[in-house]
Amino acid sequence: MKLTENTLVGLTAVFTNKLRSLLTMLGIVIGVAAVVGTIAIGEGARTLIMEEIEKVGGRTLFVVERRNWIRKGGRWTRNTSKEYIKLEDARAISALCPSVKEVTPEIITGGKVEAGRESQDYMIEATVPTFMESQSWFLDFGRFLTSDDMKSWKKICIIGAKVWEEMFNNINPIGREIRVRNERFTVVGVMEEKGNVFGELDRDREIIVPLTTAQRRFRGNDHVELLWCKANTFEVADRAVLEAKTILKRRHNGDEFFEVHSVKQFLDEINKIILIIKIMLGGTAAIALVVGGVGIMNIMLVSVTERTREIGLRKALGAKKRDILFQFLVEAMILCLVGGAVGILAGFGLGAGMAKIITAIIKEADWPATISTQSIIMAVGVASAIGMVFGLYPARKAARLQPVEALRYE
Amino acid sequence: MLIEVENLSKTYTMGSVEVHALRGISFFIEKREFVSIMGPSGSGKSTLMDILGCLSKPTSGTYILEGLKVADMSDNQLAGVRNKKIGFVFQAFNLLPRTSALHNVELPLIYAGVSRRERRRRAREALEAVGLADRAHHKSNELSGGQIQRVAIARALVNKPSMMFADEPTGNLDTKSGAEIMEIFDKLNDEGNTIIMVTHERYIAEHANRIIHLKDGDIEDDEKMK
């Protein structure tokens, strides 16, 4: 018998008992919605993290900084190494590591900033001209650092959007003087608004000064605190880290006084955690699906008993075992697939709703509900598998009925 | 020879009791015959009908249908035989509920794998033959008892079987509708169809040209009419 005929018979059976079919589908709907919804939340976490990572320079980023603590003989001790990261290290890494695209050295500090009668504490980032590119954070107006600023330790600064607002009331600040940690600086530019990164680092309340100026005026040495490095591609990120480490060690007598944090390592860790969350949520949802499947089996058994005489009649008219098996399997599959389709739609809603609730609770970021094709394919696959597995037993029972007994069934 | 039955017996076990529904009966049925099987309830006529209709297998003895030994056939082969060689008309529950007359008539053709267009054509023809062309799209619950039996006859005919089995086809009908049904059977037999009918009403049985009387699982009498 042809597939289309079995499908029609199955559809008819589903539509003849509308209420019963709906109630049966409900189990599958809830199960699939739970799977799709919870996975959407898990995926949302990933999307959120990726967005934050893009704000600090993307997936290829890694940071080199001096270690504060070193593990020696099973104990953590303060790093007493005489070695420090220098500006020359940044140039060397940039020149000698084939997988590294660029290196931006930086010193991060803070201090009192005064302009006229206004006075406030701000974060101070001392860096080099490549900073804008490396952080994907650009000027609103004015100019950025130049190599000339670097060479002659110029006392100029570029201010964040909030600094501009709070210090100058949004009046043109270019050429105006401000005092940064009691040193006079001239404002030459204003950065565009950037917002919070990871909910902590408020880049709009920052002042950017030349690295060399900070070394000379604030620190009194030629040390660099950290290096923002970027690999050529995400794929070579691990290799880029290795190359940078090798160069640094070579330049500092083999001393491993520094440590490297790469976004890729972080993402690998995050992915592991998200996977665990997804497995836990998905597992709970899978239980709901199994319960739905048992509901399907239950109803299909009722359906087979109710239609024993129909089965007998069909067999008398020439239906083979496989025809009957197919007819009931198709019926179960239709219930599951329609339930699955509705469940996917409900899952969208569930995911979006949960994302709203999470956003309301954490308050810091807009938690997205990311629906992936992967989760849809999985939900549909699971729904049809449940139709097959839980429909098979009742369908076999129907197929094995002896025609005479089925016909004479009262 | 259409049907050769030799020493056919059927034994059921009901709980711990063995019931001998058929006790080694033998007979032949030729093509184009109209045979009635009569007997009181418990005489084994339904059991005989089930075996002849390939709905169940005998406990012992041989049943040869158009030269084929039924005992040797698999379930699937039997389904094929029921589909192509046999047309059934039952006493009750003949049609699928909530399904159109046309679709009911199409059922054997669906299982035979006939194309949709061809199925429609043949099903309409068969309904015309029983005078129900105008009821083709009525659901089975919108038809009268007589009409239901006529749809069942149309369905039995639609695959052009070697023989038709009717199990108390008028059992649930009033006299007038019963007479109409029997008229159709007479006509079909005149056109060359082999009909085997189970009944317990003498005046229905007499439409046949031969009556096999069963009693306690044995042939009591094989009566030739006309």
Image (cartoon, coloured by chain):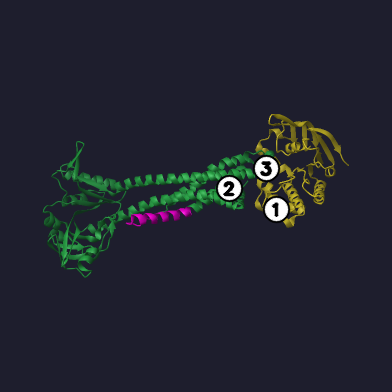
Chain colours: A green, B yellow
Residue A151 position within the rendered picture, expressed as x and y whole percent measured from the top left: 13, 59
Of A51 and B98, which appears nearest the observer? B98
Q: Quadrant of residue B68?
A: top right
Q: Nearer the viewer, mark 2 or mark 1?
A: 1
Which residue is rendered at x = 55% and y = 52% of the image?
A22
Residues behind callouts 2 and 1 on a single chain: no
Find out whether the residues at labels 3 and 1 contact each other: C-beta distance under 8 Å. Answer: no
The amino acid at mark 3 is Gly
Q: Secondary structure at mark 3?
A: helix
Residues behind callouts 3 and 1 on a single chain: no
Q: Is residue A355 magenta?
A: yes
Q: Which residue is mark 3?
A: A312
Q: Which residues are magenta?
A: A344-368
Measured in 3D between alpha carbons, the distance from the residue under mark 2 to the one under mark 3, in whole angstroms, is 18 Å
Residue A253 position within the rendered picture, expressed as x and y whole percent measured from the top left: 15, 42
Residue A4 position within the rendered picture, expressed as x and y whole percent measured from the top left: 60, 50
Q: What is the chain letter for disc 3?
A: A
The amino acid at mark 2 is Glu
Q: What is the chain letter for disc 1?
A: B
Q: Is residue A393 left or right of residue B164?
A: left
Residue A49 position within the rendered picture, expressed as x and y whole percent measured from the top left: 33, 52
Q: Nearer the viewer, mark 3 or mark 1?
A: 1
Residue B222 visible in the shown view: yes
- Label 2 environment density (alpha carbons within 10 Å; few <14, some 14–19, many ≥20): many
Q: How many marks?
A: 3
Which residue is rendered at x = 78% and y = 49% of the image?
B173
Q: Quadrant of residue A111?
A: bottom left
Which residue is rendered at x = 52% and y = 44% of the image?
A293
Q: Which residue is mark 2?
A: A331
Q: Which residue is mark 1?
A: B141
Q: Is residue B133 left or right of residue A127?
A: right
